[in-house]
Image (cartoon, grey):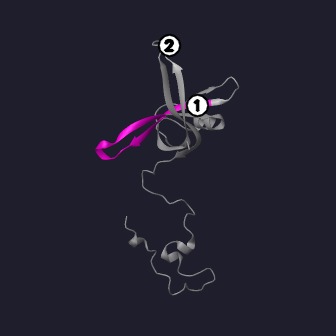
Amino acid sequence: MNQVNLIGRVGGDIDIRQTSGRKSVAEFNLAVDDGFGENKKTVWVGVTLWGATADCAAKYVKKGDRLGISGRLSQDSWEDKTTGKKQTKTKVTCENMHLITDKPKDGYREPQGARSPEYGKPEQRSGSQNGAKPPANVPDDDGMDEIPF
């Protein structure tokens, strides 16, 4: 199995070009955190995108954006022109990309429509749409005080 899933930040501008067959190819480096606390370090991973995914990244993604990518490991090899030694580079060929937005500066905002009236705040559950009262076994609070975090 050859599958990689990463979340990180784009480390620079995306380099996009066209192959001789007019297929788009884009490359960039992704900064991925590894470890915790004082042992935390940044691992730089080369990422390659092809076709429509490359075009989309070139249009919407910029340096510092947080991305989630899924793909497979691949390896480029070449001969160094100055030393004549064979060089290799392992990278991720991206198959799926997701732009991850950061939390708003003023705190969490619940998406509109994320809670249905049945499970919303107590004042929203005070009665059903036909005017009947909720069953007696339904608690008056939403249980949010019991969550441990």
Residue 148 in view: yes
Q: How many other residues sit within 10 Å of disc 2, few (<14), some (14-19) or many (≥20)?
A: few
**Side (left or right) of 95 relative to 101:** right
- Mark 2 vs mark 1: which is more N-terminal? 1
Q: In the image, residue 139 lies at what x, y percent?
A: 47, 81
Label placed on residue 26: 1
Say which residue appears at 39% left-offset and 72% top-offset: 146
Residue sitting farthest toward the front: 1
- Which of the image's four quarters has the C terminus? bottom left
Near-viewer residue (117 or 83):
83
**Disc 2 and disc 1 in contact, CB within 8 angstroms:** no
**Residue 58, picture quadrant:** top right
Report the amino acid beneath label 2: Lys
Residue sitting farthest toward the right: 21
24 is within the stretch colored magenta: no
Near-viewer residue (140 or 37):
37
- Given this view, does label 2 or label 1 mark the residue nearer the observer? 2
Q: In the image, residue 13 lies at what x, y percent?
A: 51, 30
Residue labelled with disc 2: 81
**Residue 55, picture quadrant:** top right
**Side (left or right) of 51 relative to 93:** right
Residue sitting farthest toward the top: 82
41 is within the stretch colored magenta: yes
Q: In the image, residue 86 lies at what x, y percent?
A: 49, 19
Residue 58 in view: no
Q: How many other residues sit within 10 Å of disc 1, few (<14), some (14-19) or many (≥20)?
A: many
Near-viewer residue (136 or 82):
82
Say which residue appears at 34% left-offset and 47% top-offset: 36
Label placed on residue 135: none
Region rendered in magenta: 25-45
Say which residue appears at 58% left-offset and 37% top-offset: 57
Give the Cα distance between marks 2 and 1: 24 Å
